[in-house]
Amino acid sequence: MASSPYHAAVGVAVLSFFLAVGCANAAPAPPPEARAPTAAPSAAYALEDACKQTAPHYDLCMATLSADRSAKSSDTLGLARVAILAVQKNASETATYLSSIYDDESIENKTVQLQQCLEDCSERYEAAVEQLTDATVALDMGAYPEARALVAASQAEVKLCQRGCRNVQVHRNILTMRNRDVDRLCSIALTITKLIRTPSPSAAE
């Protein structure tokens, strides 16, 4: 028996319905987290503004960071990276210096206490350099709290070096200035790293 126009229309409607249901099941909507990529850290601070936050180390901050050509065009994250790399370079140079003078027999008044001071500080600076290297990696991965913790840990190593040598009378001519410089650079790097703003969960939706 031939189909009436009515039955043909019903068949088309039913077929369209099942096709629509099948497509919906075959291609489910992606979850919200897949649709909304994480936003980049806020570029809230330029070079001068960031260094103003590091007072009383503003002049050192400007001199150190502006030495890197990329700093003037960097956002807060970029400035934090430049700051950490600056500390890492300074600490690495100090570690090399400590290693060289530890083996230098020409230093006058090189007492047992001074030798112990140099050995301890050499180990602490090596640890600080490793922590700063890890801090840069953490920063690049977006692990900002971990980066801050590693910078703080490296600063603690420097302070322990200074404290451990305070009873060595001649250490002031060898370490105090270097410890002070690295300590200040750590403070600058830590402050700028704290300025990095991550987006709130609602902003990513």
Image (spheres, rainbow, N blue to C red):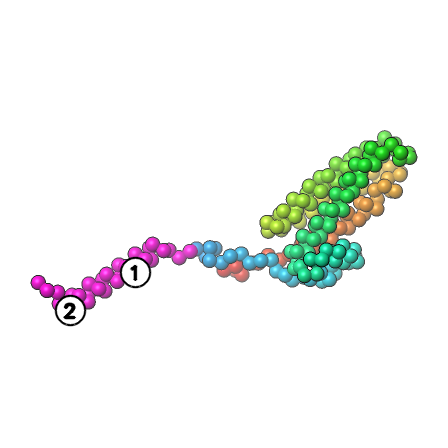
Q: Position of residue 79 (x, y in %)?
A: 68, 56
Most common SS among magenta residues = helix
Dot 1: within a 10 Å radius of its alpha carbon, few (fewer than 14), some, or many (20 or more) residues? few
Dot 2: within a 10 Å radius of its alpha carbon, few (fewer than 14), some, or many (20 or more) residues? few
Q: Is residue 35 left or right of residue 180?
A: left
Q: Secondary structure at mark 2?
A: helix
For the point 68% across and 54% down, the residue is 80
Q: Position of residue 32 (x, y in %)?
A: 45, 57
For the point 86% across and 37% down, the residue is 168
Task: Residue lying at the far left in this picture: please name it.
Answer: 1
The residues tagged by marks 2 and 1 sit, at their Cα atoms, a distance apart of 23 Å
Give the image quarter of residue 68. bottom right
Q: Quadrant of the N terminus?
A: bottom left
| Mark seen at residue 5 | 2
Q: Position of residue 20 (x, y in %)?
A: 30, 60
| Residue 137 appears anywhere in the view | yes
What residue span does the magenta drawing correspond to?
A: 1-30
* 124 in magenta: no
Q: Is residue 203 left or right of residue 70?
A: left
For the point 73% across and 50% down, the residue is 86
| Mark seen at residue 161 | none
For the point 73% across and 48% down, the residue is 87
Q: Amino acid at mark 2?
A: Pro
Rendered position, 8 above or below 193: below
| Mark seen at residue 20 | 1
Q: Position of residue 181 (x, y in %)?
A: 80, 49
Sooner in the amino-acid sequence: mark 2 or mark 1: 2
Q: Amino acid at mark 1?
A: Ala
* 14 in magenta: yes
